Image: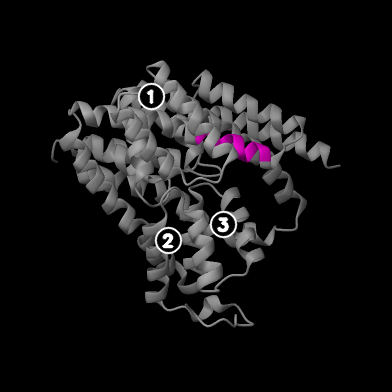
Amino acid sequence: MSPGADLLAEIAARFAALSFMAIGGIMSILPEIHRVVVDVEGWMTSAQFAELFALAQLAPGPNAMIVALIGWKLAGVAGALVATIAACGPSSVVCYVAWHWVDRLRQSKVRVVVQRALAPIAIGLILASGYTLALGADRSPGAFAFTLVAAAALAWTRVNPVWVLLVAAGAGMAGLA
Amino acid sequence: MSEPEPAAASPLADITRAELFASFLKMGLLGFGGVLPWARRILVDERRWLGDREFAELIGLCQVLPGPNVVNLSVIIGARTHGPVGSLIALGGMLFVPVGVMLLIATFYASVAHEPLARNAIAGASAAAAGLILGTGIRLLRQARPPLRGLASGAAAFVAVGVLQWPLLWVLLVLIVVGVAAEWLASR
């Protein structure tokens, strides 16, 4: 076994367990990923976590790509592939097995009730993600202002988030963050 | 562009593996700042594989199932066209470019990460990225307008997981049981 094999196995186990908890998408488990990666494992600081998240937002593709970047940070290209497969694999198997059955419940009361119950929980978890990231990223009043402006832009306008990130990166370069 | 006339039966049956891969590749490639709008554009407007309503129902389905929504979308559309192989093809197409681009960005980041200018840019972007997620949550909240019981479970999720940083599994178990019970009682 190479020295990295233990780490890869741990990355796989951690992300596979999280995969099942991603109700409503990957943003629901971001605070939990942060808790495991920063607080439990001590693999990186909260600020580094927020930086990786920003980089992940700049790339195309699903938000789930943040796990590829975390895997890369820990164990290079192999880490990125293992983390991506572990985070998407188990939930995909559940989805493959269950979608037909859940689809047939479309009109049933059970499905409607579960969907209504899950929706606000998922929104609460998305806000918890933003809060967790802000704690890591906002180390100055300027940075805090960036967070507020970006939040307002996304909540009340139709601007593409990539532009918000690029403008913020430019303003950061100018020393405003 | 494909022909303007949508087929009467489900057009999903006639999709070749190459078409399946190509369309999900395109979604992953173009999906800057979120894949879902592109998924809709490509699957509904461009290829006409799904109707508007069918697409909306599919997204609802993806949201009830665990896992990233667009990943689930790939799995389901792949499954409906070519079974398990189809799911793998769609998933591979969706994730192929993003993972590659991510590795390029990561490598670039590693090479410039200690430059002061790059540090400042990343500080600005990461502060804004946190705001983007908060803004997304606020937008969703405004659209959903949950009743008081929903607001309570959303607030509980935010405080327990965000502020108190409790382990997600236990918070989810409790909130889902309580939330489903509350919705069930309210719907009687």
Q: Residue A135's x, y, as percent? A: 43, 21
Amino acid type at image mark 2: Met
Position of residue B81 relative to residue A74, above or below, is below
Question: Pointer 3: what residue?
Answer: A98
Provide the major secondary structure of the magenta segment.
Answer: helix
Element class at badge 2: helix
Which of pointers 2 and 3 indicates the residue nearer the eye? Answer: 2
Q: Nearer the viewer, residue A105 or B72?
A: B72
Location of residue A11 in the rendering, given as x and y in whole percent from the top left corner: 31, 37
Chain of the residue displaying label 2: B
How far apart marks 2 and 3 lie (CA) works out to 24 Å
Q: How many marks?
A: 3
The answer to which of B148 and A5 lies nearer the viewer is B148
Q: Which residues make up the magenta segment?
A: B133-142
Dot 1 amino acid type: Ala
**In terms of secondary structure, where does tag 1 sit?**
helix
Check whether the beta carbons of the residues at disc 2 and disc 3 lie within 8 A of each other. no
Residue B117, quarter of the rendered image: top left
Q: Secondary structure at mark 3?
A: helix
For residue A103, what is the image quadrant? bottom right
Residue B178's spot in the image, x, y percent? Answer: 70, 31
Is A3 magenta? The answer is no
Q: Which mark is residue B27?
A: 2
- Residues marked 2 and 3, same chain: no
Position of B20 relative to B145 (above/below) = below
Spatial distance from mark 1 to mark 2, Cα to Cα?
A: 30 Å
Q: Which residue is situated farthest in the right direction here?
A: B188
